[in-house]
């Protein structure tokens, strides 16, 4: 049943029109359940009726003609209850409505299942049996599951058909502010090599041509994407290029085609042969190369499977759409062509959302009803303030959004007036604003001039785009560049924080619960060579500049902190012994897990500063996966529990006279910034796009007022109440514009 469910959903998603989709649904469901009839009625609210739009088993001429008033008959009853109705003999039921046009009055068995989208009933799927029949549990759950999975596609098809698109939108989470106008480009996860079947061929020549064309396309794509990275960071792309041209890969596949198998299976076997060689190697590094070969194989397969589809082309205003969008897929789009991101998975606190905010790119994530497979090449508007997506918008919606975008520009110009002014309160208290950077490979990050320095440099990117751990020299170059750009201002570089939602292709971590698993400092301490190499590169990069601060992620125990510090001291001694003029930088611990909150005072006694990562702290305090759209509404960094944790951290640091910075997304939220100011935090670190907004707030109120607001917030019982309190307070001082959605 599962397989047939999957096939029906795939087929429907590929349908070209609503009529097609409904035809597929009724014939496949009828067949799968072994019923005599399957029909779909869609609800037309404006005419207050359910219209028969497809049937397999009833008279075809009834389609479009049979209209059941909204609250009449069994169909009306299913829709009214938004629940299934299963009857072994429908004709005996009080709600039964005899309809002669369809020939349905001859049938007895009845199963009606509502098609529900966002709590709204779109229509009813009905199965009928000539004889009396009790549909079994398996059959009922099959139809329910299918109806739930198809609701999105039906909704979209109907909007297209009725030209209702203009006023409708799909809802997700506001992940990165701004309004993006553009054309959608859909990206998929890599193709599945293992699922390719054997297929005997007659036209070997044609398969060879197809295979060579796929290699050529992939080669061109590798070059284009690789060119966007610096020489040091493009190692993975160079390695792929070499594999692509290697005789063993090309000849192996050609020989298998010559033996009579089609190109896709020839590729499958050739890649399997190569990976098994690597898999058997003793050296763990070489063993890990197998995953690079597999990645390349999937890439070629994708091109083979889309042989007649052109290579991905990015229109000038590209809106990237996918179920999950990876950092690599985002990096593949030329930055000048990017207009927005829309994904059905993820949430506002996923790393891809953080990346989007850093790039000033509007994004809506967790758009659960997104019909991804049918979205290529559609004119779309992304409203990153509200998390809305308008597909094929009407002229009036477009005009409205163009007006908003103009307002946005005017607002940005207003904010521009704050450039160069100090970030201090009306009573002269200075709260320096730092920059979060690192996930984007940039020579000179946006916001470089405005920020007091870098409060969080995430070092993961060079690790993500390579085919192996970067060596000390390559890392040195990266760190040196960022330290030089900002010198003499301080740059806080965080040691590697992989795991969670940032896996490395060459260092697979398979876990069912990755955010509670092997991530951040845990990986580093288990692999001292990785940690030591990174720390040595950081210490050396700061020689002569002395503006480095070193930050340790995901610390949970004092033991981890002690061990990491011991290793940093060892790296320093090694470098001194080797004759380098290195010095010990200030070291900070990130407070990201509840255990660290409660031990903040002990942590503060051991390090030079604390930096609160509110993104992870919120996820761990509230037990809400920051990547899971289903629970995203529960993720709230203004939750009073998070605020209380912050005050605990500040008190712990104060006991040792240490400073506390906040580098999670809360710091870049104007509402959050007010509370952090009130809590006595010493600095805030945020993405470039937030710097001026936050400065606008800081410059508009006194520290005393911020303290009062924090105390009021701590007395609130919910995050919503805190948000309301803060929004009201900012509106009172004329800053409502900073927090209105649409800003
Ligand atoms: C955080 O968790 O708040 C943080 C700054 O780290 P990251 O978002 O990279 O996990
Ligand atoms: Mg974190």
Image: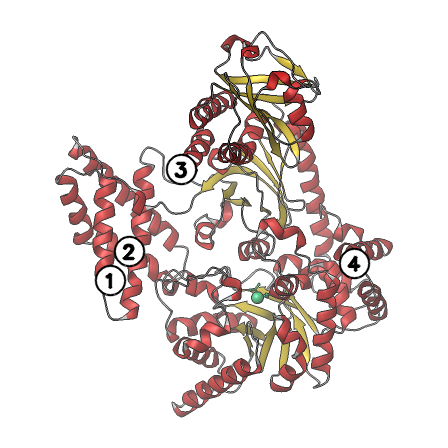
Q: Which mark, by number, is residue 722?
A: 4
Name the image quarter holding residue 398.
top right
Give the foreground label among 4 and 3.
3
Looking at the image, which residue is at 32% across and 58% down?
291
Q: Position of residue 182 (x, y in %)?
A: 55, 38
Q: Nearer the viewer, residue 403 or 251?
A: 251
Mark 3 nearby-residue class (10 Å; few <14, some 14–19, many ≥20) = few
Q: Tell which circle, 4 or 3, labels the residue nearer the N-terminal end.
A: 3
Where disc 3 sits, the SS reads helix
Q: Which mark is residue 293?
A: 2
Examine the image and state in which quarter residue 394 appears: top right
Of 517 and 372, nearer the camera is 517
Report if the CB atoms under discs 1 and 2 are less than 8 Å apart.
yes
Q: Residue at x 70, y 80 (%)?
A: 652
Q: CA distance from mark 4 to mark 3?
A: 47 Å
The answer for how far apart the CA atoms under marks 3 and 2 are is: 29 Å
Say the numbered circle drawn on residue 3.
3
Residue 321 percent location from the top left of the image:
50, 42
Q: Are marks 3 and 2 in contact (CB under 8 Å)?
A: no
* Mark 1 residue crowding within 10 angstroms, few (<14) / some (14–19) / many (20+): some
On whether ligand 1 comes within 8 Å of the CB at mark 1, the answer is no
* Lower sequence index among marks 1 and 4: 1
- Dot 1 falls on a residue whose secondary structure is helix
Point out the tag, 1 or 3, that comes first from the N-terminus. 3
């Amino acid at each position: 049943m599962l397989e047939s469910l999957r096939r029906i959903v795939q087929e429907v998603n590929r349908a070209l029109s609503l009529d097609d989709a409904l035809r597929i649904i009724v014939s496949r469901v009828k067949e799968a359940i072994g019923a005599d009839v399957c029909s779909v009625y869609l609800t037309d609210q404006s005419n207050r009726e359910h219209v028969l739009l497809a049937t397999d088993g009833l008279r075809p001429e009834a389609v479009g003609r049979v209209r059941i008033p909204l609250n009449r008959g069994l169909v009306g009853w299913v829709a009214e209850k938004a629940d299934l109705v299963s009857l072994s003999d429908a004709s005996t039921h009080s709600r039964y409505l005899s309809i002669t046009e369809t020939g349905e009055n001859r049938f007895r068995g009845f199963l009606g299942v509502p098609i529900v989208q966002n709590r709204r009933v779109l229509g009813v799927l009905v199965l009928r049996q000539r004889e009396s029949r009790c549909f079994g549990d398996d059959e009922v759950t099959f139809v329910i599951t299918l109806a739930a999975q198809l609701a999105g596609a039906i909704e979209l098809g109907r909007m297209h058909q009725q030209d209702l698109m203009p006023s409708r939108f799909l809802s997700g989470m506001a992940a990165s502010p701004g309004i993006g106008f553009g054309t959608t480009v859909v990206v998929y996860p890599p193709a599945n090599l293992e699922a390719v079947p054997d297929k005997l061929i007659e036209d070997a020549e044609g398969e060879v041509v197809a295979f060579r064309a796929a290699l050529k396309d992939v080669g061109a794509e590798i070059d284009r994407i690789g060119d966007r990275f610096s020489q040091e960071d493009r190692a993975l792309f160079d390695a792929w290029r070499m594999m692509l041209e290697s005789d063993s890969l090309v000849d192996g596949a050609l020989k298998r085609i010559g033996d009579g198998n089609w190109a896709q299976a020839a590729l499958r076997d050739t890649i399997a042969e190569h990976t098994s060689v690597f898999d058997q190697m003793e050296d763990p590094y070489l063993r890990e190369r197998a995953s690079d070969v597999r990645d390349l194989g999937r890439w070629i397969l994708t091109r083979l499977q889309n042989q007649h589809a052109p290579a991905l082309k990015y229109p000038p205003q590209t809106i990237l759409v996918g179920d999950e969008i990876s950092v690599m897929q985002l990096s593949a789009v030329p930055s000048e062509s990017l207009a927005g991101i829309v994904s059905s998975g993820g949430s506002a606190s996923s790393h891809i959302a953080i990346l989007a905010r850093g790039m000033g790119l509007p994004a809506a994530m967790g758009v659960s009803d997104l019909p991804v497979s049918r979205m290529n090449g559609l004119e779309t508007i992304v409203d990153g303030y509200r998390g809305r997506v308008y597909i094929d918008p009407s002229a009036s919606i477009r005009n409205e959004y163009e007006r908003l975008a103009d307002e946005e520009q005017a607002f940005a110009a207003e904010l521009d007036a704050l450039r160069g002014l100090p970030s201090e309160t009306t009573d002269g208290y200075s709260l320096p604003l730092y920059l979060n950077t690192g996930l984007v490979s940039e020579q000179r990050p946006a916001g470089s001039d405005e920020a007091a320095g870098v409060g969080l440099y995430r070092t993961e990117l060079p690790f993500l785009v390579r085919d192996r751990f970067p060596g000390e020299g390559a890392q040195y170059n990266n760190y040196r560049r960022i330290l030089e750009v900002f010198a003499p201002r301080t740059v806080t570089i965080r040691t590697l924080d992989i795991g969670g939602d940032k896996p490395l292709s060459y260092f697979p971590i398979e876990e069912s619960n990755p955010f509670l698993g092997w991530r951040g400092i845990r990986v580093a301490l288990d692999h001292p060579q990785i940690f030591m190499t990174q720390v040595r590169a950081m210490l050396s990069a700061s020689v002569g500049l002395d503006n480095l601060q070193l930050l340790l992620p995901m610390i949970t125990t004092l033991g981890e902190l002690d061990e990491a510090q011991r290793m940093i001291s060892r790296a320093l001694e090694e470098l001194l012994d080797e004759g380098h003029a290195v010095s010990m930088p200030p070291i900070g611990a990130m407070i990201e897990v509840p255990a660290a909150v409660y031990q903040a005072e002990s942590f503060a006694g051991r390090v030079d500063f604390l930096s609160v990562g509110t993104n992870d702290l919120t996820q761990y305090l509230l037990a809400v996966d920051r990547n899971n759209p289903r629970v995203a509404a529960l993720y709230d960094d203004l939750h009073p529990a998070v605020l209380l944790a912050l005050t605990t951290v500040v008190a712990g640091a104060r006991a040792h006279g240490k400073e506390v910075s906040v580098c999670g997304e809360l710091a870049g939220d104007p509402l959050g910034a007010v509370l952090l100011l009130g809590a006595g935090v010493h600095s805030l670190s945020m993405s470039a796009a937030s710097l001026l907004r936050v400065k606008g707030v800081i410059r508009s109120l006194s520290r005393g007022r911020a303290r009062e607001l924090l105390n009021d917030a701590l007395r609130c019982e919910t995050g919503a109440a805190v948000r309301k309190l803060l929004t009201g307070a900012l509106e009172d001082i004329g800053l409502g514009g900073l927090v209105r959605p649409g800003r």
